[in-house]
Amino acid sequence: MATSASGTRTAAPRAQRADARRSVQAILDAAVTCLARDPEASVVDIAAAAGVGRVTLYGHFKTRAELVDAALVRTIERADQVLAATDTAGDPVEALTRLVASSWQIVDQFRNVLLAAQRELPADRIRSVHDRVLRRVRALVERGQRTGAFRTDLPKRWLITTVFSLMHAAAEEAAAGRVKVDQVPGLISATLIAAFTPPGENARTPLG
Amino acid sequence: MATSASGTRTAAPRAQRADARRSVQAILDAAVTCLARDPEASVVDIAAAAGVGRVTLYGHFKTRAELVDAALVRTIERADQVLAATDTAGDPVEALTRLVASSWQIVDQFRNVLLAAQRELPADRIRSVHDRVLRRVRALVERGQRTGAFRTDLPKRWLITTVFSLMHAAAEEAAAGRVKVDQVPGLISATLIAAFTPPGENARTPLG
């Protein structure tokens, strides 16, 4: 066994550090999965799902709040990556369709982890991370309203709320097995495109 | 003090029973209000909100589950009354507008109490009461699809989910002070009417 005090046996500590990193990854993956399913998930549930003992978990995360914060950061990083990789330029209706298809799952996961975080973490911490995910949807809705592609008789904020609300509702239907996962993006897009059509204009049909 | 064994002094027991009924009413009102705000609300919170002691509360409801069940029944009775009093005949778009205006608040309250109930009560109990509230919305969506007023390219079930989802989202916005309560029905109706318009047709503008 390696001793951390010895500089002559670095291979074993390095292996230990690699082990620790794998544990942390497993714990974070399990935390995101468990909290997305149940925002009340306990540290014991998460340790079990990660296949590590409670002592190991508490070795990496001193409190449930610390773990929830780390799970939130991880979810946001993923959501950011997905949203950044989505082309939201060009025709706003087509951009909205692409955004829904690429991100409904990660946005829904984010929402549930956020719900867990809201019970543990301070409000300003929540607000700052929430804004990061909201930003791209907000920018698209703003552009759609500005260019006349989306209705302007309803406030921008409500249109953004509608996007997130329908993503979440459809994700719940899919999780309950009432809708097939591959039908979800189509349901959300078809509903949003019609809902956002300026009054008196023909609703466009969603893309393929 | 009256003794319940005596037939000659009924006034005092009757007064006691009236007191008990008032306690039960106060506890149920408090339970609905507290659970609608926070599905995790404890028996202690509810007793405090009702202005009764914990012992009094447990005298009427032996467990939190019993209390949650009674609160759920009360919410459903109210929702049923409101929905039954709403005219959902005639033009489906106008009927939907009336339904939203009369019931978004009670439907939202119901949803949160239901969330509390889902953690305490058996699934078949939940399903039977949930169906009662769903029924009228389902009937209206069915009629709208049958008569061609609402789109048929999306499943009936998804349109119903959209109704409840947007009612809830708007209620949350109002609760957070981001939307004025008197604007809520208009936001929901305008969004639903457009969302339900058959593809290729002109979206109708909401009433009033």
Image (cartoon, coloured by chain):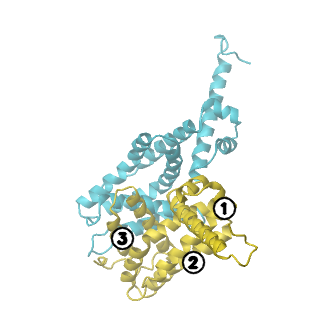
Chain colours: A cyan, B yellow
Q: What kind of residue is marked 1?
A: Ala
Q: Residues within 10 Å of mark 2 (few under 14, many from 20)?
A: some
Picture coordinates of residue B173, whole percent (x, y): 39, 59
Residue count near mark 3 (Cα–Cα under 10 Å), binned few <14, some 14–19, many ≥20: many
Location of residue B143 with respect to A81 vertically, above or below: below
Task: Where is residue A179? Give x, y as percent.
Answer: 56, 68
Q: Could one spot residue A207 in this view of the protein? A: no
Q: Nearer the viewer, mark 3 or mark 1?
A: 1
Quarter the C terminus of chain A occupies:
bottom left
Q: Position of residue A199 (x, y in %)?
A: 27, 73
Q: Is residue B94 visible?
A: yes
Residue B65 disc label: 1
For disc 3, the marked residue is B185
Quarter location, residue B93: bottom left
Quick one: label 2 or label 1, which is nearer the N terminus? 1
Do residues under tags 3 and 2 come within 8 Å of each other at their CB atoms?
Answer: no
* Left or right of residue A96, residue B140 in this image: right
| Distance between mark 3 and mark 1 Cα atoms | 33 Å
The residue sitting at 41% across, 58% down in the picture is B175
Q: Which mark is residue A157?
A: none
| Residue type marked 3 | Pro
Quadrant for the N terminus of chain A in the image:
top right
**Residue A72 appears at what percent x and percent y?**
50, 42
Q: Chain of mark 3?
A: B
